[in-house]
């Protein structure tokens, strides 16, 4: 149950507008997860806070925090900046690929069953569509416009596990994505070409800003970081998908400014290797490779999906 409460608290932290009070967390839980006991929740809030004494974090000391206290009873989401030194060995070593991560082997393992009809090639077709038709993805009545954009994005998300039985999206049709496609069409021009080689402070701010726009556009679905980052990877290719395997492999617990800084550092230390592993996308019409390459963020996504415990070929994405 403790692990479940931790995940629920992470969900809550990303749902509440910052800054938020303890009372707002306490009120949010009965509405969304009434099975959680308040005393257990309060204990988890303490354990999940970055700037409390280490002994106050108890058995969760090895996990990256979820919250940072900025005043009495007032919090913001943890962004990785407060306790850089408190990472567990797995979290630190994940940024030292020379000793713990065989980048090339991980990519080969991920791609070994890849072909034009394979499940995860849905990424290729979605990414190709949005990149090729940037100016027309939200146009109504156009062959490459709104309807096709909704269908491409919906099928890609389904292929990547976002329409499972417990997902709110499962109760929605493809037309639910209309506001999302409009938000994508109105996204800053810079995000379309943003990749890990542009992850300076401004680039990271852009990722986080667009993520908020994506999250808002998916309402009333309560979009998780997993869903938001999968949308951004499939459309812009600018950020890895922060799903279960990636976060475990990379040694982070949240999609945050601090996590993105780690991604930037990992890329900077391994740029030549990552750049050399960028694959051509498959074309939907011909089934043949195109001249469009996977982004650097997509390569890093594949590496840590495998490192996070992914057991075989590209057959599951949590």
Image (cartoon, grey):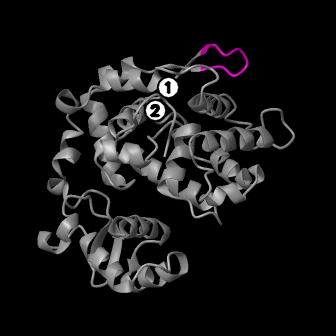
In percent of the image, x 67 and y 16: which residue is there? 287
Residue at label 2? 298
Q: Residue 77: where, in percent of width, then height? A: 36, 66
In percent of the image, x 44 and y 82: which residue is there? 24
Secondary structure of the residue carrying tag 1 is loop
Q: Residue 75: where, in percent of width, then height? A: 34, 75
**In which quadrant of the rendered view does residue 46 lie?**
bottom left
Magenta segment, which residues?
A: 282-289
Q: Residue 294 got which mark?
A: 1
Q: Residue 244: where, in percent of width, then height? A: 41, 49
Q: Residues within 10 Å of mark 2 (few under 14, many from 20)?
A: many
Instruction: Tell whether 217 sits left or right of 259.
Output: right
**Is residue 142 or residue 52 the one in the foreground?**
52
Instruction: Tell whether 273 sits left or right of 239.
Output: left
**Is residue 204 or residue 106 the one in the foreground?**
106
Q: Residues within 10 Å of mark 1 (few under 14, many from 20)?
A: some
Q: CA distance from mark 1 to mark 2?
A: 6 Å
Taking the magenta stretch, the answer to whether it contains residue 287 is yes
**Is residue 258 or residue 172 the one in the foreground?**
172
Secondary structure of the residue carrying tag 2 is helix
In percent of the image, x 54 and y 51: which residue is there? 227
Taking the magenta stretch, the answer to whether it contains residue 34 is no
Q: Is residue 40 above or below residue 213?
A: below
- Check contact, mark 1 vs mark 2: CB within 8 A: yes
Instruction: Tell whether 3 sits left or right of 269.
Output: right
């Amino acid at each position: 149950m403790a692990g479940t409460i931790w995940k629920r608290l992470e969900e809550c932290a990303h749902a509440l507008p910052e800054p938020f009070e303890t009372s707002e967390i306490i009120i949010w839980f009965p509405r969304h997860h009434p099975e959680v006991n308040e005393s257990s929740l309060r204990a988890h809030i303490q354990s999940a806070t970055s700037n409390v004494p280490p002994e106050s974090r108890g058995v969760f000391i090895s996990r990256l925090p979820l919250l940072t206290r900025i005043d009495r009873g007032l919090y913001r989401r943890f962004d990785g900046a407060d306790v850089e030194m408190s990472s567990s060995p797995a979290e630190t070593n994940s940024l030292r690929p020379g000793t713990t991560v065989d980048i090339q082997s991980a990519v080969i393992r991920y791609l070994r069953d890849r072909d034009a009809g394979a499940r995860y090639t849905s990424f290729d077709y979605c990414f190709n569509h949005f990149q090729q038709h940037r100016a027309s993805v939200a146009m109504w009545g156009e062959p490459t416009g709104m309807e096709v954009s909704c269908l491409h994005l919906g099928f890609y998300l389904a292929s990547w596990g976002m329409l499972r039985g417990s997902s709110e999206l499962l109760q929605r049709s493809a037309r639910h994505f209309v506001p999302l496609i409009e938000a994508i069409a109105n996204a800053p021009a810079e995000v379309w070409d943003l990749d890990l080689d542009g992850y300076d402070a401004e680039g990271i701010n852009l990722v986080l800003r667009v993520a908020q726009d994506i999250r808002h556009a998916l309402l009333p679905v309560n979009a998780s970081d997993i869903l938001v980052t999968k949308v951004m990877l499939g459309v812009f290719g600018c950020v890895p998908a922060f799903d279960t395997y990636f976060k475990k492999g990379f040694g982070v617990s949240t999609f945050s400014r601090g996590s993105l800084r780690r991604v930037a550092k990992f890329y900077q230390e391994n740029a030549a290797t990552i750049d050399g592993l960028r694959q051509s996308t498959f074309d939907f019409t011909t089934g043949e490779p195109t001249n469009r390459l996977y982004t650097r963020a997509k390569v890093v996504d594949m590496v840590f999906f495998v490192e996070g415990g992914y057991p075989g070929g590209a057959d599951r994405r949590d």
